[in-house]
Amino acid sequence: MIRPLVLIFVLVLIWSAPSKAATDPNPLLRLKYQNPGLRVDLGVGLWAEPLPMDFDGDGFLDLVVNCPDVPFNGAYFFRNPGMDTTLHPSPVFQPGKRISAGHFNAAVSYGENEVTVMTPGKKYPHFTQDGFSKGVSLGLPANIHPRRV
């Protein structure tokens, strides 16, 4: 059993020892949160799922990002305004707009002339109008594995 005096001595040594960050000649710098001068194109959440599609029907590939977790729960639409590709080789998206609540395990599927958004056991035929609010059952269980893997 550790005696209380020894425990206090060890805690004092640990507390008073200089930290590695204080002695490191190249310390890591903490990034400022909500830096007003920072400019980013996309930002949704940690477990976000990208769903690239022409969401607004203008012929340009937009990005819908689904995030099922807190605090960003939702599906967000980032419009591709179709800027000049000689100036911007990659799309520069407009700020995101929340279009729906988020859903776990969303995926996009591309057919002949249509894009279908699906989640386990459901599809969303009118996703561009209703988001994840009006799902249609595929007639299959959401999880087909007997142990819910």
Image (cartoon, grey):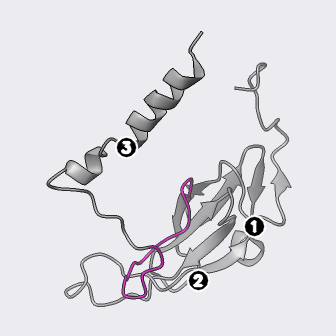
Secondary structure beneath dot 3 equals helix
Return the residue found at the far front: 5
For the residues labelled 3 and 1, the Cα–Cα distance comes to: 49 Å
Report the span colored magenta: 33-48
Q: Position of residue 16 (x, y in %)?
A: 37, 43
Mark 2 or mark 1: name the one nearer the start of the chain: 2
Corner quadrant of residue 45: bottom right
Q: Is residue 24 above or below residue 13?
A: below
Q: In the rendered image, which residue does mark 2 sit on?
A: 56
Instruction: Tell me whether circle 3 and circle 2 mark residues in contact (CB < 8 Å).
Output: no
Return the residue found at the far left: 25
Q: In the rendered image, which residue does mark 3 sit on?
A: 16
Q: In the rendered image, which residue does mark 1 sit on?
A: 101
Q: Is residue 112 left or right of residue 35?
A: right
Mark 3 or mark 2: name the one nearer the start of the chain: 3
For the residues labelled 2 and 1, the Cα–Cα distance comes to: 18 Å
Quadrant holding the C terminus:
top right
The tally of labels here is 3
Residue found 26% across the figure and 53% down from its top: 22
